[in-house]
Amino acid sequence: MADSDISRLKIKRAATPVAGAPRRRRRTWLVVVLVTLAIAAALVFRSMTAPIPVEPVSVSMAYPSQSFALLNATGYVVAQRKAAVASKATGRLEWLGVREGSRVKEGEVLARLESRDVTATKEQAAANIKLAQANLEQGQAELNEAERNFNRSRDLLAKNFVSQASHDAAISRFEKAKSAIAGYRASIAVAQANYRATEVGVEQTLIRAPFEGVVLTKNANVGDVITPFSSALGSQAAVVTMADMSTLEVEADVSESNLEKIQPNQPCEIQLDALPGVRFRGRLLRMVPTVDRAKATVMAKIKFTELDPRILPEMSAKVSFLSQEMPEGERTARTVLQPAAIVQRDGKNVVFVIKGDKVSQVAIETGARIGEMVEIKSGLAAGDRVVMRPSEKLHDGAPIALSAK
């Protein structure tokens, strides 16, 4: 009896649960859930802080006249009055009184050639004048003496104190004396003409300014041989090149297919590459009445309405032919931006300004359209970079990555 009771007391190990197993399973599941939540949070945070690829665009400056431009052309600034100043004489350059940039008046002596030979010829011509004048004085004295002898012989002939032959000789001497006077006066005229010719020769050794202007280039130095046509080896023809700066104009090539868009006296706007921030007013002065068959263009000459001392010959120029004259208040540059960079946020026009690797939302005030651009009255400055076509997820302070175009 006792033995059977004891046999029933055996422990069944497979059916008895292990103490603490459910607790370990719960802990495992908790760790899995926490890890999953951490990964999800990391993915969400990464998606929220990941740089947004954007396309940058710069704020620029534009002129309202661009909206009225019918045609654009390129050309150069030239002087209508320009001269390579030379001498008609041949000689060695002895003195040069100007340099590049010198302002000269009409008739001012710019340079001088050696003139000892022509000066000596001039002095000789002056001496010939004095000699001819002395001969005239001598001939006048002989004429006076011949006239007195003639009068005396005539009185004596009336009283039969001299013969007719003697009186005829007195008449002959008197007539010859009068003829000699005419010859002496003609000699004086010839000597004076020779003197004037030598004066011209001396004057040709002085190189003068043909008009008031500015010396552009210096082509010769003291000691150079100057010849009219520079035919000799090592010689120079022009001493300086000068221009009248009051006659500056722009020569631009216009395609013959666009001639119907321009007409004389049409308002123009001139931009010089050397002065990119300035626009100059101008008018189409005239067109050269011939076509360049090689380029199929016609040369248009545009006159500056107001000249500026900063404008120099041979500057590159861009000319806009306008449909109308621009008012005074619309001749200044305006800040402009492409319309695709402007979006609406909370009922306001805003842009996203790029600052380093983030953007800053800026409210702006827009104005009129200028060509394909929009005027920005406030909020931006020229040179600022903003986001082009900003997406809805872009916000103030969002990190960005500039996309390569």
Image (tube, rainbow, N blue to C red):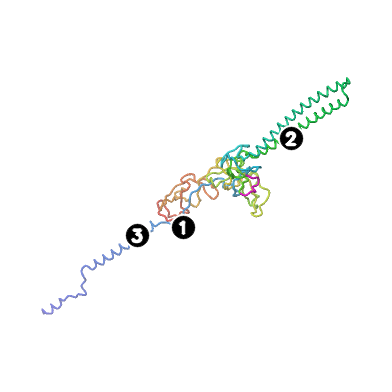
Q: Distance between the residues labelled 2 and 3?
A: 116 Å
Q: Residue at 54% across / 50% down in the picture?
A: 372
Question: Residue 347: where, in percent of width, then height?
Answer: 46, 48
Numbered tag placed on residue 267 in the rendering: none
- Observer-side mark, 1 or 2, equals 2
Q: Nearer the viewer, residue 167 or 34?
A: 167
Q: Are marks 1 and 2 in contact (CB under 8 Å)?
A: no
The secondary structure that dominates the magenta segment is loop
Residue at far left of view: 2
Magenta stretch: includes residue 2: no
Question: Residue 65: where, in percent of width, then height?
Answer: 57, 45
Q: Mark 3 points at which residue?
A: 42
Q: How far apart are marks 3 and 1 (CA)?
A: 28 Å
Which stretch is magenta? Answer: 226-233
- Callout 3 crowding tier (Cα within 10 Å): few <14, some 14–19, many ≥20: few
Q: Which amino acid does label 2 sit on?
A: Val
Magenta stretch: includes residue 229: yes
- Observer-side mark, 3 or 1, equals 1
Q: Where is residue 184, by image quadrant?
A: top right
Q: Where is residue 112, by image quadrant?
A: top right
- Residue 172 appearing in the image: yes
Q: Nearer the viewer, residue 278 or 225?
A: 225
Numbered tag placed on residue 404 in the rendering: 1
Left or right: 133 as drawn, with respect to 11:
right
Q: How far apart are marks 1 and 2 (CA)?
A: 89 Å
Numbered tag placed on residue 190 in the rendering: 2
Q: Is mark 1 on a helix, strand or loop?
A: loop
- Observer-side mark, 2 or 3, equals 2
Q: Residue at 55% across / 42% down in the picture?
A: 310
- Callout 1 crowding tier (Cα within 10 Å): few <14, some 14–19, many ≥20: few
Left or right: 370 as drawn, with respect to 404:
right
**In the rendered structure, which disc, 1 or 2, sits on the residue that comes first in sequence?**
2
